[in-house]
Image: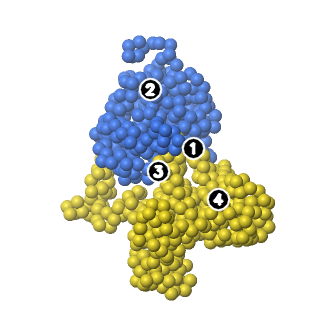
Chain colours: A blue, B yellow
Amino acid sequence: MSAATPIEPAALVPALKARALNKRYGRVVALDNADFDLMPNEILAVIGDNGAGKSTLIKALTGAVSPDHGEIWLNGQPVSFKSPIEARNLGIETVYQNLALSPALSIADNMFLGREKRREDLIGRMFRTLDKPYMQKVARQKLTELGLLTIQNINQPVETLSGGQRQGVAVARAAAFGSRVVIMDEPTAALGVKESRKVLETILRLKERGLPIVLISHNMPHVFEVADRIHIHRLGKRIAVINPKNHTMSDAVAIMTGAMAPPLDEAA
Amino acid sequence: MSDNATGSAAAERGLPPSEPGGVASFEEADRGPIRRMQEFLHRFPTSIPFIVLLIGVVIFSFAAPGKFLAPFNFSLILQQVTIIAILGVAQTLVILTAGIDLSVGVIMILASVVMGRTAVVYGVPVEIAFPLGLLAGLACGFVNGVIVTKLRLPPFIVTLGTWSIFGALNVWYSKSETIRQADVQETAPFLQWTGTIIKPYDFFSNTLGLDLGFLKGWVLNYGSVVMLIVAAVIWYVLNKTAFGRHVYASGDDPDAARLAGINTDRTLIGVYALAGFICAIAAWVLIGRIGGVSPQAGQTANLDSITAVVIGGTSLFGGRGSIVGTLVGALIVGVFRNGLALSGLELLWQDFAVGVLIIVAVTIDQWIRKISS
Ligand SMILES: Nc1ncnc2c1ncn2[C@@H]1O[C@H](COP(=O)(O)OP(=O)(O)O)[C@@H](O)[C@H]1O
Ligand SMILES: [Mg+2]
C-alpha cells in the first residue's frame, strides 16, 4: 500500500535511529560511536563478525543495556529506554540471541510473559485471574500461523523443546506482538533449512503488514534474499550500509571482515 | 529397540547426538527406562514427596502397630506440622525466586510479640494490635526484599543479617518477657482462636445431622484451617495470576525474565513482603498453639520450614516447585518424627532421618534438573 507512494515526508523519518552509541565492558569496547538507521517498512539486515557488537547494538536500542552515551529516536521522537519493558510498551519487539524464554514455564506462558491476559469478568477483575484458555488459544494460533513447529501440548515446558523449537516460540512471540518495530538477533541460528524458510516468510509477512524489521544473520543467502538494505557492523560501529542489488555476497563479506574498503556514502 | 540401537551406534562413531535439524530424532534415540523415569519426575516432581509420605506411613504402621495408624495420632501430627507448613509456604515463595529466607522464624516470633504485647501489656484493642502484628511481618519482609534487590546482595546474607536485626528488635520490644496464657485469654482471646479445637465428627452431626463414623477420633484446630486457607490462596496466586508466573520466571532465569519485560525487582520485593505477611499469620497460629506469647518460641522453625520446602521437591535453584509439595514435605517431616518416636527410637534418630531426607531430596532434584541442560 505505502509502497505505491514511495516518497512521502513520513517515509524519510527513520522508524528507529541512533547516533554515536557507546558501550564498554571493562576494557572491551562493544559499541564505538555506532550509528543506526532503520527506515519505515524496510527489512534491514545487520551483518558483522562474531564480537563485532551486533547484539550489544540491539540491546542498547531496546533498553536491555543502557549505552554509556549516545542518542536514540523512535519515529523522530527522542527516547531513552531504562528497561526492555519500556521499549516493548512502545511497540518494539525483539528476539534476543539468547531468546529470553523461561525454561520451566509453558509455551503459552512464555508467549504472554510480562503481558498476561486477565479474565474480563468480575472474577478476573476482583482476583486478577488469568485467562488461560484465551492465552493458550492465541499461542497455539500464532505458532500454527508461523508453521514452525507441530506442538502437541501448548502447556509443555519450553525446556522440553529442541533448540529450533524454542527459537520458533521466540520468533512467534515477537511476530505476534510487534506493532512498530520487530528486531531478530540470529533467529535462524538453530534452525534447519525448512524452518529457516518459515522464519524468512514470517519476516516478509511482517513487512507486508507495514512494519520495519531488523534481521541479524550470518547467512548471506538469507540476507540477500530478504533485505532491502544491509548494515555492516565492524569493530563496534557501522562501517557501511549497502544495497544488496548493487553488491555481491562476497563484497559484503569482504567489507565485513575488513578485506575490502567500505564504499563511501551510498544512497541505498 | 531400533531407536536405541541407532543411538548407541551414533555414540560409538563418536558423533554428537544432535545436529541442526536432527534434534527430534535425538530425543527418540536416548530413551531407556531410567531416562523415562527422569522425564516423568521432571513433569510431575511432586510425585516423589507423595511416594515418600506413603512409604513412611506404611513403614510406621508396621513399626508402631495400633499406635501410629490412629485418628488421634494423625490429628496430633497435623497440629505439630501446622506452623512449619505455613512458614514453609512463605519459604516456598522465596525459594522459587532462587532465594532463601533465614528470617521467617524470627519474623513470626516478632509478629507474635507485637500482637500479644500490644494487646495484653499495652492494652491496645486487639482490633488494632492484631493488624499491627500483620503489618510488622509485612514490613520485615519488605525490608528483606528491598535490601536483596536494591543492594544486590545474596538473599542468604541479607536474611542472615535481618535474622539478627529482627531478633534484636524482638528482645527490645518484648523485654524478653513471656505473656501468660491466662492473660491473653482475659484481654485478647481472639489471638488464641487458632488453638480452638474442632471435632469434625461432632461438627457434622450437630450442624447437618450426619453420622460420619470415619471422622470419630479426629481432633483439629482452627490453626490447621488457617494453614489450608493460606496454602490455597498462595497456590492460587502462583498458578492463576500474572504475579505468580513472574515469580517462577524470575527464579528460573532472571535475565531472560527481564528481557521478556518482567520487573524482577518488583516481583522479588513482592515475594519477600508477602512471605513476611504469611509469617505474621503463622504468629497468630503460634499464639493459638502455645496459648501465651513467648519471645523464645519456635527456635527450630526456620530450618524446619526450609526442610519442608526442599523435601517437598522445590528446587533451591529457583523456578521449580509447588505449594502442594511443601505441604506434603511438612507432613513427611511430621510423620517421620512422630513415627520414629512411636517406634521407640531415641530423638536423635529423628534428626538423623530428617537429615537423610534432605540430602536425598536435593540429590533427586539435581538429577531431575539435568534433563533441561
Ligand atoms: N555482558 C557482557 N560483558 C562483557 N563483555 C561483553 C558483554 N556482552 C558483550 N560483550 C563483549 O562485547 C563484544 C561485542 O559482543 P556482541 O555484541 O555480543 O557481538 P556480536 O553479537 O556481534 O557477536 C564482544 O567482545 C563481547 O565479548
Ligand atoms: Mg550476537
Place of residue B208 in the rendered image (x, y in percent of width and height, measured from the top left) = 45, 61
The secondary structure type at the circle numbered 1 is: loop
Labels 4 and 2 positioned on one and the same chain: no
Q: Which residue is mark 1?
A: B263
Q: Earlier in the sequence, mark 1 or mark 4?
A: 1
Disc 2: residue Cβ within 8 A of ligand 2's nearest atom: no
Q: Are marks 1 and 2 in contact (CB under 8 Å)?
A: no
Labels 3 and 2 positioned on one and the same chain: no
Q: Which residue is mark 3?
A: B239
Place of residue B341 in the rendered image (x, y in percent of width and height, measured from the top left) = 52, 83
The alpha-carbon separation of the residues under discs 3 and 2 comes to 37 Å
Q: Nearer the viewer, residue B261 or A54?
A: B261
The alpha-carbon separation of the residues under discs 4 and 2 comes to 53 Å
Labels 1 and 2 positioned on one and the same chain: no
Q: Nearer the viewer, mark 3 or mark 2?
A: 3
Q: Residue at x 50, y 30 (%)?
A: A91
Disc 4: residue Cβ within 8 A of ligand 1's nearest atom: no
Q: Is residue B232 visible?
A: yes
The secondary structure type at the circle numbered 3 is: helix
Quadrant of residue B95 within the rendered picture:
bottom right
